Every structure is written in structure tokens, then in C-alpha cells.
Image (tube, rainbow, N blue to C red):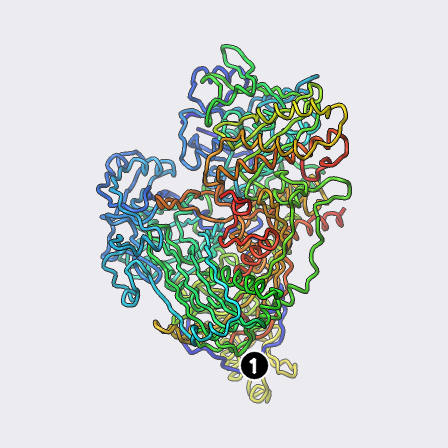
Amino acid sequence: MAQNTRTVPAGTPTNVTQKHAKGGIGESTLRPDGTLKVTGEFAYSSDMWHEDMLWGQTLRSTVAHAEIVSIDISEALALPGVYSILTYDDLPAEMKNYGLEIQDTPVLANGRVRHHGEPVALVAADHPETARRAAAKIKIDYRELPLVTDEASALAEGAPLIHEGRDDHHIGHVPHPNIVHRQPIIRGDVAEARKRADVIVEGEYVFGMQDQAFLGPESGLAVPSEDGGVDLYVATQWLHSDLKQIAPVLGLPEEKVRMTLSGVGGAFGGREDISMQIHACLLALATNKPVKIVYNRFESFFGHVHRHPAKLHYEHGATKDGKLTHMKCRIVLDGGAYASASPAVVGNASSLSVGPYVIEDVDIEAIALYTNNPPCGAMRGFGAVQACFAYEAQMDKLAAKLGMDPVEFRQLNAMEMGTIMPTGQVVDSPAPVAELLRRVKARPLPPERQWETAGEGADVRALPGGLSNTTHGEGVVRGVGYAVGIKNVGFSEGFDDHSTARVRLEVINGEPVAMVHTAMAEVGQGGVTVHAQIARTELGVTQVTIHPADTQVGSAGSTSASRQTYMTGGAVKNTCEHVREALLEMGRRKNGSYHPAWAHAELLLEGGKVVTDGGEVLADIADILEGEAIDLELEFRHRPTVPFDLVTGQGDGHVQYTFAAHRAVVEVDTELGLVKVVELATAQDVGKALNMLSVVGQIQGGTIQGLGVAIMEEIIVDPKTAKVRNPSFTDYLIPTILDTPTIPVDVLELADPNAPYGLRGMGEAPTLSSTPAVLAAIRQATGLELNKTPIRPEALTGTL
Amino acid sequence: MDFLRPASWEEALAAKAEFPTAVPIAGGTDVMVEINFDHRRPEYLLDLNRIGLLREWEVAEDVVRLGASVPYTQIMENLRTELPGLALASHTVASPQIRNRGGVGGNLGCASPAGDSHPALLAAGAEVEVESVRGSRLIPIDAFYTGVKRNALAPDELIKTVHVKKADGPQQYSKVGSRNAMVIAVCAFGLALHPETRTVRTGIGSAAPTPIRAKAAEEFLNAALEEGGFWESGKVVTPSIAKQFGDLASGAANPIDDVRGTAKYRRHAVGIMARRQLVWTWEQYRGTGNGRSLEGAA
Amino acid sequence: MRVNFTVNGRQQEADDVWEGESLLYVLRERLGLPGSKNACEQGECGSCTVRLDGVPVCSCLVAAGQVEGRDVVTVEGLADFAKQREEHGHGGACGSGGSAGGCGAKGGVTLDAAKRWQARPGDSQTGEGVELSAIQQAFIDAGAVQCGFCTPGLLVQADALLEENSSPSDQDIREALSGNLCRCTGYEKILDAVRLAAARQSEAV
């Protein structure tokens, strides 16, 4: 534990800007975990191993909505090698549910299942195959119940209530108990503004259910400890949020559940909710043996929430000279059987539904439904992604109707610093929307017909269909499309969003070494790289060690909402500043009398030394410390936000906004309906790039997740049974390297004065505008309206 | 589960005779997925990896005798002249890693209508050499597929080689999937021109309960080419012939709606592929080079 | 059943193997070599790619019993494998089995090892005592590693590509890596890494 734990408000103790340090912020330093990751030594959660460990297996419901009439485990329990089988009746504590915001999710089904693949029973056995065989022998008698699968069936008279007796804090304001949360936003006077419109366009848009499809399936190892507690090694996005949900269900105090972050094989929102964490702990405590659970890809599709599918209805008006007059929209998100992050998704969808545009008169409503479909929750850009797909389609429609260039039309209405959002919040840092569009448009277009090789043949790999040899150029038409989006950064709507960093400065082998300890989940984004850079910059040291993330240090919040560099990066910066101040204080105490500069000059840490801002060396850090260590753990907060008013939607609900624009160039085989994205150029403002290599990597990765949902990715749920039809990588397709284009990236750095180093959270924005840009390009190539994503070949060939 | 590891073909046949429910495994592409995902628990797995003759091929005068386990990669690299359609089809199979291990025997044994090699085998003309302790026989490819994931093998038989006719003219193969690599066919089509007999043959994948030929389309085209004197003159095939051929191929399909595509789309796509391939192969036949020298294609 | 085979140049024996186990499972859970990854177990992602008798294959699709008597190279042995190739001018089995490729615990990563995980001071440029193959170093340098779960399979596959084709075109790289899914990077930096490794190799020759 930290030696001197204290909580102080965010803010800098000294108003000093450290100079550039080698390996500090702004450099593209390389990942500290890179070597381990390329040698196969990096320990992911599924790589854990323990002598005597058992394997856990989850038995999941085969139907979407049913009463459990009976469960018979006797035959399964008799199987040699089976150590334990648990059902709802075996849960040890009063608390039997969990959930991010609303604890509505049963750890194991309690007499009723509400979606396909809901956990019903757990098995621990000596081999995964034994566990699977045992699970197959558990007999469950289901009596199926009527299904709720969409808005009509959710709100119909006499509709089954997905959660009876709701007592969460949204029930008071929702119009129906099958609505998780509703957020209206009313500003100005739409009826009046509508009269000024020379053109009005309406559109109905459908956004499919996307999966995070991180490559490392849910997994972890729970080890029972002698004190009756449990040690859990797991891949997650937020250790402390997990802990808060796990401990009550186990009937243990939080200090008896010790969590350590294992290697995380991607997340993208899909690890914000609990998956196997509680199950592994329950089995470990029941058997008093270490228990490992590893989902396979099939189970992974049931093991985490997905991106909310959405139906969005928009109306926009504009004057004939191209000024937007008003916007009305209604966004219906399908939250599935459990709440997960639905309330926050509603908040984002509604508050960002207008996009990065100036519209003074708006009438907005967003709701999330409870249904018997798979639960939906966090995924990169949530709420904002669905809205962006729709409002960008509307912008193209308006531009077309006005006979204007789609980019110029957007630029004419683009928001900027000082714009008032529909929530009444003033955008108080740079919002270079028009400039981002200008940059992507100014790029030269990639040459046409690149498949034509020097001879007379064609390189099919450059054509739609690729290696499948479906066209040699026949039917192929090019299209170009643009889009821009807006996303909020950090946790909004009054949430006490904070992050903790512990920093220890000591001398090892004669050299000052900083150790940074946070609970931040490194999920691949490169937070660990940036933490080391910040420590080098702020403490003027070369050597930085990153301590493994665990619950022995305060919460770092989630690795989501584009917030970690801002928040935990900010926390590391803040703690480093206090450590620096403590060191200087120590120096003054010890050496102050030797040199007047100790008292009068601005002092910096540079190259392991205390120097004056004039460059004069006063002391070695090592000499000041003299074997002592400075060890501080401090919390950091962004500026407070407030909840949106439940009637008007007004309120300064967001911390910071972030923007990206894309230009997509596609080639479409219009006869077969196959699409090849040739280039996806993007421009994004990141405030300050702490590590450009990582920033570009995030932008390119986010861009391709947007491409995926544009042309191939969708979890298909059978509307008749509410069952998932494609839970595998054979039928849930994500882009391969032959599906992805070149992705030129243009990074702007316009500082946000409110944020650490002026940085802007940036992980999600590229996922927003990529999808509508691809859609726009396909529309341009085909002339089709295309209101649903993903685009399937059927939609392009009239063969639905 | 038992794992049988015959060291020779004779041992394999003996094992299959003794344990007719044994599931042969070579490249593992289908079998291992079924085991990993708990979809199948065969009593016996019969490993064919140790049998060298299954990985050999022989180019004879008229046919290529292709061992059941010759990896697709080898077909692509070594047999593109003799078996151009199959080489193209091989190139669309899954991923490079899978093409390194999987062979035509797996496609035939599994007999999924979505198997990538079927349309090419149907179009080229092939016979499947199967053997048991009772003896061996040649099954014409047209008689091999008997139902959805069912084939003409007896329980004690194993697939030894496939005798594919050497190309005597241009062949093409296309597959539609919703991504540009590593995708299961939504539907597929293969076309082979056989100038020696002045006939054409076709194959359709993933658009009927079994892989099939588009016989009406073949008959139409055979007649049209003959009547128009196209084989002799080498003149350009008229758009109306190409369209009619495509329409008839489309009509031969008998697809279903499933998670990968609609029946309507499959029928449509088969027609487009057929039409395009007729143009490509015919241009190749005429020697214009148009449609030839495909970078990246096999 | 018992399975004997060579992994990264060392003779290995796995006992009590269930007949339905894959090579991937045996490597990860029985031989202490969890570097090959279990992302899909259906041959769709390439994360488990290993060299089997020199040929890149998905180890999830190889039945454990099929590797009897054969030779496997995993990401843990890739650096040694590449080094031997450089020294002897060919690929194939690596004789010595260096530290990285050696088999440690019976199973995967022990807790002690997991707890010991610490980002090394400095950055990955130095690598401190770890000898990397050209492709491994290039992946780090080009920023091709994010979560890293796809990385082992990509490295084995990309190394095999460069062994065969020392100056691949972009389309060649794309084709060779089309069986390896990555969800983090959008593949651009992976292309960069392969180009970088190819360029460095040609400089070195």
C-alpha cells in the first residue's frame, strides 16, 4: 500500500511546466509490454494456470423467454471428475443480482430466463470436456413465455413485463416499465422554426446489433484464499466496478475479493459488464480449489453485451441557402433483457443526436427498451454511433435536395467553439468541425481502377469480392462519401468520474526510478505507454516501472468513454506533480541553505536532477532522496457535470467533446452487391497527442470497426424466437486485411484548456463517422437510399 | 473417444471396416470445429495424416489423380495449368493456414453444399475413387452428392483420390461471400469449356441442397455455340447468349434463405457469375487475354 | 492417450491427453506454451498459427493425436527459429530450444509469473536480454501491437511469408495475412511492420 495516502482536489501544486524529457509526452515511445506480447510471454487472462485447478463451465438457456419449471442436476453431479454444480438456489448471499447501474441481472437465472444464452447453472470439473459433458447432462424443463422483441411488442397492451416490480431510479419517469430510460431534449420552438424551412427531409434509419468481437474471449482464474476470500485474475475494463458487483453476491467484504488485471485481449466496451467473474469465484469458493473459466468464441457471443441496435426517425429542415432550421428525432434503442449501460446510451444518443451542427430548435426523444433480445450495453462510441449514422444520412439528403455540395453544406452548419448544444451546454474548447471536413476533402483521391495491372489482367485482390474472383471490373462503380461526428469524453450526467494514481519515487542502483501504480485496465490502447511518458515528463526520470493493475490501489474508472488518457493519465500527472513538490520540499529542507535558487527560482526536474528554469543544476534527485521514497496515491477528477433535466434535457451534462471526419472511397460491384472500400481518409482533433503512434493506431482501429458495421457486421436475432443465429466467427464477420483500405490519418492538436496537457479523449470518435462515410459512398455509387446498416449484398441488388 | 492412427492406407481401410462410425480426420477444418464447439462427439477419430499416398498427385494423360489430402495450397501452386478451375476454387478456401492442410477429400467427405471445390469438380468432370477392404470403385462426381451433407460413400469406405479431367480449355470459378477473404460461400459457380468435345460443364455451390450442375444452361449453351459455329470461328459470344446462359444457371439454383443470404440473392448471383464466367472463359478461348493473367488468382 | 512431439526444438511428451483435444490446447494447457492464442477455435482468426513440420497451420484445427512424432514451432520459439534460419540458411526444426521457447510449468502461466508481470522500465526498443526475430522487432517498432492477442499468430504467419518472399507487394502481404483477424489496429500498422521487416532484411543481406 501507499505510504502516504491522501486525497486532495485536482489541481497543480506548482504552476511549473516541465520541459521536454526523453521518452516523455509527445514522443512515440514504444509499448512497455511490447516485447512480452511478441514473444508470447504476456499473460492474458486465458493463459493463467494453477496446480490442481478446475475448469468452470456455464450452462446457458436455449430459449429466450421462459419459466424454469425444474432443474435436475443429479445425473451431471454423478459424473466422475465433477466437483460442483451450482444453480440459483446455491447462491450464498442475500444479493443475487448485479449490474453496472441497475442491479437487475441475476448471477444465475432465478426461475425465469429473459434472453437466449442466459446463465442457468455452473459446473466445475477436472477437465473442460468433463465440465461440458456434465453441463449437457443437467436437465432443465422450460415453459416458454410470450416474447418481447421490439417496441410494438414491448409496449403492447398486456405485454409481458421483462422486469416486474422495478424499483430503480428511472421507473418514476419512464412511460412504460418495459422502457429502461427515456430522455427528451427540447430547445427552441420546432413548430415555429419549421415554418422557416424551405426544404424538409425525413428518414427512418435502422442500425444493426454490432459485437465488440475482441479477440481474447472472456476468461479468468479465481483462487480461494485461506481467509475465506478469493483472488481473481481477470480481463476487464474496470476492476473496481467489477469488485463492487462481485463482493455482495459472494457475501464477502470487498477487501476479501482481491482482483488483479490479467492481460486483456481487447475490450471495446464488451468487458465493462461482468461476464465470468462471479461464476468463477462462486465455483472456487464452493470447491475450495482454483477455478479457471475460458469462454470459447460461441459462448463469448452470449457472454457480453452488444452494441444497441436502433431505429431512428429524423426530420430536418433547412432554408434554401443551406442553413439548418430545426431537427426532430426519435431514437429507439433495444437494450435487451437487462439494463447494462442502457441509461447512459440513451443519454448520449439524445444529447448528441443533433451531431456537430448548429441547430437552435430541436425536439428530441431517445428511449431504451427492455426486450427478450440479447442484452446490449457499452461499445465504442455508444449512443453517438447510432445517431451519427442517421444524422449524416440526413445531411446528405438535405444537401442533395438543396443542390449543394455535401461537404460545403456541412461546413455551413458546422458547430464551433461557443456553439450551444441542444442541452444548453456551451462548447468551450476548440471544435474544428469544418476544418476536419476540409482536410479530408482536400486529399487527392486514390487513382481509379487500381485493379488493372501492367499487363491485360486484373488483380482480383484489389476488386470487390477479392480472392473470390467475382469480377474483373464488370459492374464496378466508384463512390465517395463524407461524414463527421461528435462524441462526449468521460462519464457524463453528474457521475462522480474520478481516477486514482499512486506514484513512488525512489532510488534503485543509484538511479531515480518512478513506479506508477493504477487500476487502469490496459486493454491494448496503450495507457501503460502513456503513463510512463507522463512520469518521465513530470519527474525528469528515465526509468519508469508500471505496476500491475489491481484493487490494492484506488479506482481508475473504466477504460471506456475515451477517458483513460484524460482521467488516469491526468491522475498520474497530478500525483507526479505532488511527488515533485514533495521532492523539492525535501530538497529545500536539506539543501536550501546552500543555494538561493532553492528559495527563489522556479525549479524543474530534468535528467534525474533538480534544475532551475535557467538550467542550473542544484542537486541530483538521488542525493535528495538518500534512500527514502516518496510514495503518494491521489485521486483526480474532471470538472463536474450535471444530469440532464428529465423533461427538457437541459444541463451541462458532458465534460468534453471530440470530433472526427472521414472520407470514404468505395468501389461497388453493383450487379453482385459486393463492396470494396478503397480508402478511408480521416482527420481528427486530439487536443494533444501524448503518443502519436498510439493515437494513429487508435484512429485506424476505430475506423475499421466503423467499416465493419457498415458492410458486414451484425448479430442476427431471429424475430420469431429472439435467438441469436450467428454466434461464431464463421457467420459474424469482421473485416480481414483484404477488406480494409489504406487509412491516411490527419491529426490536429488544438488544446483544450480544461484538460491535462490540453488533450482530448480520442478513442471513440473514429468509430462514429467511418460508418456513415462508407454508407454515403455506397449511396453515391449505387443511387440507392440505404437506410439500414450493415449493407448486405441483397440491399444493393434488390434481392432481400 | 478413441484416436486411431493407421500408418498405412491398408491399416486405414481395416480400421474403417472395423469401426464404420469412425470419423476420418485429415486437415481438421470441419471435424475439429465440431469437436471444439461440442457439436459432435464421434466414438472414433481416424487420423489420415500419416498416409503419404493421400498427399500425392499424379498427372496422367487425361486426368490428374489427386490424393484426397493434397493441400489446397499445393493445388494452387502446382496444378493451375491442369486444373485451373479447381486451382481458382482452392484459392478461395478459408485462409492460407487452412489451405496449407485442407484438401478436396474433406470437402467431399463432408459434402456440404458450401464446399468450395465442388463446383470446380462438377465443371471439370471428375470421378471419386473410394476404397474399402471390399475393394475400390469410382463414383462419378454427378452421382457423388446424395443429399444435404450426404454422399455416396458406404460406411466402410474412405476417399482415396479424385480423378479430375485435365483441362482441355479455359475454366473459371467464382464465389460470393460477404467479405473479401476467409468466408463461407453464399453461393459459388464454376464453368469449364471443353473444346475437345465442344461442350461446357458447370457447377453450382451453396445454392441447392447439394452441389449441382446447371444442366439446362449447359444444354442451351452447347446448342447455341454449336449452332452459331462459335467453336470454329472463335467469334465473340453475343450478349443475348450470355444473358440466357446466366438466366438458365440462375434457374437451376434451388437455394434457401439463411443467415448468410437470401434465396433470391443466391439465384441472382449465380446468374451474374455464370454470365461473367462465360465471357471470361470465352475470351480466354479466343485467346484475347481478356480475363487471363489474374494477379492474386491461382 | 500419450502424444510425443517436438516443440521449438525440444522433445515433449503429453500424457492423459483426451482424444478430442487440439494441438492448441495441448500447447497451452499441458506444455506451458500459452503464446498461441485461443481466439476462435474454429480456424477463422489465425491467432493460434504455428508451424507444423514447417507449414503454418491453425493449431486449433490439428487434433493432438495428429502431431505424434512431428515438429512444431510456436511464437515462443520464433526468435530461435529465425536465428537458426539465418545461421543455417534454412528454416525447419530448431535444434537448441532457447530460453524463450522452452517449456516451463506444466500448464499455462503460473500465478507467480502473472503477478511478476511488470512493464519493463524503458521501452521495448531495448528488449533487455531478449533476442527477437526481425518480424517481432518490426511489430513493436511499427506500433502493430495493441492488445496483442492476434500478434503471435500474425508473427508466425508473417515470418513464413518473408521466408518465402523477401519483398512482398502490399497485396501479397494482405493475401498472406488474410487468415489472421485483428480487431484493434485496422491492419495498417501490421502492413507497416511487415514492410519494415522486409526492408530491414534486405538491408542486412
Q: Secondary structure at mark 1?
A: loop
Rendered image quadrant of residue C123? bottom right
Q: Identify the residue position indicated by label 1 in the image.
A: A16
Q: Is residue C126 visible?
A: no
Q: Quadrant of the N terminus of chain B?
A: top left
Q: In the drawing, does residue A435 fall left or right of residue C106?
A: right
Q: Residue at x 63, y 66 (%)?
A: A27
Q: Quadrant of the C terminus of chain B?
A: top right
User: Residue under mark 1: which chain is it in?
Assistant: A
Rendered image quadrant of residue B21? top left
Q: In the drawing, does residue C91 fall left or right of residue A112?
A: right
Q: Residue at x 54, y 82 (%)?
A: A15
User: Image height check: is B162 above or below A415?
Assistant: above
Q: Nearer the viewer, residue A524 or A21?
A: A524
Give the crowd class for mark 1: few <14, some 14-19, many >=20 residues within 10 Å: few
Q: In the drawing, does residue A741 fall left or right of residue A227?
A: right
Q: Nearer the viewer, residue A105 or A381?
A: A381
Residue A480: x %, y % from top left? 63, 57
* Mark 1: amino acid: Val
Residue A709: x %, y % from top left? 51, 52
User: Image height check: is C114 above or below A396?
Assistant: above
Residue reaching furthest top? B134
Residue A174: x %, y % from top left? 30, 65
User: Image height check: is B247 above or below A203?
Assistant: above
Q: Nearer the viewer, residue A329 or A694?
A: A329
Residue A659: x %, y % from top left? 55, 67
Q: Is residue B57 visible?
A: yes
User: Image height check: is A292 above or below A338?
Assistant: above
